[in-house]
Image (spheres, rainbow, N blue to C red):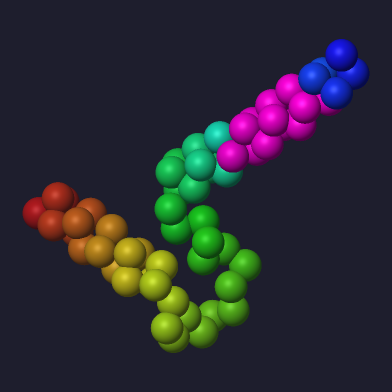
Amino acid sequence: MFQIILTVIIVAAALGFAIYRTVRSLRNPLRGCEGCEKNCNGCSLEDLKKDVEEKKAKNKK
C-alpha cells in the first residue's frame, strides 16, 4: 500500500511540475531572454522577439 501512495505522490509532483513549466513558457515565450547578457547573437528567441515587435508595429498602423 505504501508503494502505491508513494508512486502516486511522485507522479502527481512530476505532472504538476510539467504543467507549471508549460503554462509558464506559454504565458511569456520571451522569458528565456531575461537574465541573458546583452549579446544575443545566435539566440533563436531573438528572432521570435523581432517577429513580435514587427507584428505590434504593424497593428498600430
In the image, what residue occupies the spot 82% across and 18% down? Answer: 5
Image position of 25 with respect to 8: above or below: below
- Residue range corresponding to the magenta coloring: 6-18
In the image, what residue occupies the spot 44% across and 85% down? Answer: 41
Picture coordinates of residue 29, whole percent (x, y): 43, 53
In the image, what residue occupies the spot 49% across and 47% down? Answer: 25
Image position of 29 with respect to 32: above or below: above
Picture coordinates of residue 20, whole percent (x, y): 59, 36
Q: Observer-nearest residue: 55 or 7?
A: 7
In the image, what residue occupies the spot 64% across and 31% down? Answer: 16
Q: Residue furthest toward the top?
A: 1
Judge from the rendering whether residue 57 lies leftward or rightward of residue 14; answer left or right. Answer: left
Magenta stretch mostly in which secondary structure? Answer: helix
Picture coordinates of residue 15, whole percent (x, y): 62, 32
Q: Is residue 8 magenta?
A: yes
Judge from the rendering whether residue 53 lies leftward or rightward of residue 19; answer left or right. Answer: left
Image quarter in which the N terminus is found: top right
